[in-house]
Image: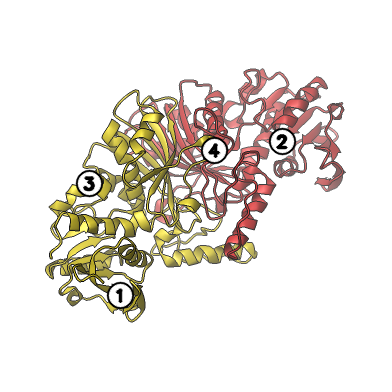
Chain colours: A yellow, B red
Amino acid sequence: MNETGYRVAVVGATGAVGQQMLKTLERLNFPVSSLLPLSSKRSAGKKVVFKGEELTVQEATPESFEGIQLALFSAGGSVSKALAPEAVKHGAIVVDNTSAFRMDPDVPLVVPEVNEDDIKKHEGIIANPNCSTIQMVAALEPIRKAYGLNKIVVSTYQAVSGAGAEAIDEMYEQTKQVMNNEEVKTEILPVGGDKKHYQIAFNAIPQIDLFQENGFTFEEMKMINETKKIMSDNTLEVAATCVRLPVETVHSESVYIEVEQNNVSVKDIHGALEGAQGITLQDDPTNQVYPMATTAAGKDDVFVGRVRKDLDRDNGFHLWVVSDNLLKGAALNSVQIAFSLDKLGLLKK
Amino acid sequence: MNETGYRVAVVGATGAVGQQMLKTLERLNFPVSSLLPLSSKRSAGKKVVFKGEELTVQEATPESFEGIQLALFSAGGSVSKALAPEAVKHGAIVVDNTSAFRMDPDVPLVVPEVNEDDIKKHEGIIANPNCSTIQMVAALEPIRKAYGLNKIVVSTYQAVSGAGAEAIDEMYEQTKQVMNNEEVKTEILPVGGDKKHYQIAFNAIPQIDLFQENGFTFEEMKMINETKKIMSDNTLEVAATCVRLPVETVHSESVYIEVEQNNVSVKDIHGALEGAQGITLQDDPTNQVYPMATTAAGKDDVFVGRVRKDLDRDNGFHLWVVSDNLLKGAALNSVQIAFSLDKLGLLKK
């Protein structure tokens, strides 16, 4: 711990993202004077490790946030809805990794590389965008800054870890069942709370989260609405098709964009991406260099490759965007928001 | 065999597609009076079964085609380039499932549901399109007929069987290696003949076939060029991003289109697809009904679901198109071309 740091609570500390939050706070040396791991009643009593110290997880209640300066939430939307306002009442600033407040007009939705300044408008809660949104806007913002952006059509290739640790187990169990010619059991994916469950092993499922009335899934609508909010552009055209794959971690995305300017070249797009914060360009077709889940796993950056100019529309481009959904897609972005809060002097001393 | 049928040769009879060709000729009861299975020297002597009869595979040579009326080729582009003209010289009509002649202006490129009449222009060879192209144009043609079509942006989710039987083995071997925490051996995918090989198990590889100078892969250019040729529309805008997945059989595709007419509804698109030849509409989000690889495997049809109207462009639509790449994507389409040849009276009696 750090005497001059902040009193930090992590809600959902035993989950896949919560665990990555603890690791990321430690790895990036965020100034923490005390770390309080919180969870549901079910997981209370479990142990987690932070900076070599074993800590006992406590059940999250309104009173848990007494004296807390920063609370990172990643325990599901209903927990955030119930407890984030309580944390704020107790004086904490909340960084929330659920969809509970993302589209609330009073809550900034932040990817620091894109819209760090929006944090200043916070009223206690800052929302962390959806994983598939974060990596896409991080990759597109340098292009938008340089050449403008009119339209996005994205098709995703998403990892099962986005559906939680149980979905990872299910994928590996089903894989064994297929390999052993056993009956394949389906209990969780595509959506734990939906009516039907389908095999993810050796398959691709075009459903992530529940269907909305307009035929898009909630995941697709998150990508559409969050992108417009983060980029502060309601006229930006965005469409998404979200697909789950038998991949443990790291989301990939096939992205078609139309920029505002004409006569932009692939070299120009490369130039915009090279050196951009948090972006690694991996684009050398001659040497088969392009981003993949296997090479991006465990890494902080958003990897971009396969940049091609559309053969028909002068302002059209195609990109392949890959990033670790538990890191930049979740824990890392939340911790980066915490660093921004510190930098902007918004955390109470 | 059928006394009144045709003398048919299948070149590449021991391969994954060749095997499906034999099964499909039998299953659909194509009129065959004699079946000659041909292969490379390496596979000659192997046995195949056709209509309960065991047949010995012979090495394909120019002389093999003496007396043959119909030759189905699926043994790689170089074999087709060398032997298809020889088969034609001997009086056979060739249906070629390789990329050797697809873009030859004298060779019709045919999906019977779309452009059966093009067969009439043949000069001995009819080309079977690429698997990923076939299912897409089959799904889009009924929409194009009803409402016109200006633009296609497709992202594919392609099965390893498209890269041959060895790629299937590699995927399952790598899966075992990952599950057992062993070193993962990479020898074939993404492209057997390319320099580097990457893990496909629990991954997504954005490369199918070799890279071209414009940054697109050959697979992507096949989808682009073949679609324009099959639909006889050089002004049609087409772009593709082709991605290999750890799925054994069945390709899925996320397709964005812009139609010519305005005020078209999802119901209109459904209406165009319902009852279209070779198409099954599976689109009921309320009941989580959409096409998937696991449910389309082994089936003849092209399955279409997730039809959504774009939220920004009135003429934009999104679809999810799924089909068995070894059946409609290869063997079935070739046999359908053979049926069309018979129906049009183009096979010599």
Reading the image, the residue beneath label 4 is A287
Residue pictured at 25% horizontal, 50% vertical: A112
Chain for numbered disc 4: A
Residue A115: numbered disc: 3
**Which amino acid is tagged 3?**
Asn
Reading the image, the residue beneath label 1 is A40
**Cα gap from disc 4 to disc 2, whole angstroms:** 29 Å
Q: Quadrant of the C terminus of chain B?
A: top right
**Cα gap from disc 3 to disc 4, whole angstroms:** 35 Å
**Cα gap from disc 1 to disc 2, whole angstroms:** 59 Å
Please identify, in this view, whether the residue under mark 1 or under mark 4 is nearer the observer: 4
Q: Secondary structure at mark 1?
A: loop
Please identify, in this view, whether the residue under mark 2 or under mark 3 is nearer the observer: 3
Residue B260: numbered disc: none
Q: Residue A71 location, x and y as percent?
A: 22, 66
Chain for numbered disc 1: A
Whether residue A306 appears in this view of the structure is: yes
Residue pictured at 54% horizontal, 26% vertical: B225
Reading the image, the residue beneath label 2 is B74
